[in-house]
Amino acid sequence: MAFKKKDLERFDNYDDIRKSRLSTADLKKQDKLIKAEAKALKVLQKTISHAVATYMAEEQIGINELTRRLETSSRQTSRIMKGEANITLATLAHLASLMKKTPKIIFE
């Protein structure tokens, strides 16, 4: 369903548009999926952050050396360490290789 400019002016925000397009049941289903996805992302980020912290302690290295080894920016390294990075599978594979680990993703 495409909206014309005059139609868009009647909506104050994205949530209003969602409510105009979806039923209450669909909105609840969508919100449930979004919350589950956010939870899964946080679990992955925390797991990676913990593995990186363990690696840094074992190697006795700081953020600058980790950044050099990862060949990334200090900002991205910081995000990884804080558990805030949204990394690609390629970056995950690079991290695993660097740490001499084999990643396993288990869906429970």
Image: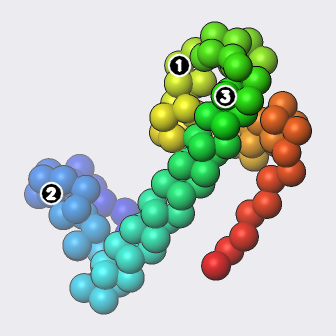
**Residue at 72% from the left image edge and 70% from the top image edge:** 106
Q: Which mark is residue 57?
A: 3
- Decide: few, some or many residues near mark 1? Use Cα within 10 Å; few <14, some 14-19, many ≥20: few
- Decide: few, some or many residues near mark 3? Use Cα within 10 Å; few <14, some 14-19, many ≥20: few
Q: Quadrant of residue 105?
A: bottom right
* Nearer to us in this view, 48 or 24: 48
Image quarter of the C terminus: bottom right
Vertically, is 14 above or below 54? Answer: below
Question: Is disc 1 placed on a helix, strand or loop?
Answer: helix
**Residue at 31% from the left image edge and 81% from the top image edge:** 28
Q: Which residue is mark 1?
A: 75
Image quarter of the N terminus: bottom left
Q: Amino acid at mark 2?
A: Phe
For residue 71, side relative to residue 53 (left or right): right
Which comes before the other along the chain, label 1 or label 2? 2
* Nearer to us in this view, 86 or 96: 96
For residue 38, side relative to residue 8 (left or right): right
Q: Amino acid at mark 3?
A: Ala
Measure how far apart labels 3 and 2 are at the Cα level.
52 Å
Q: Which mark is residue 11?
A: 2
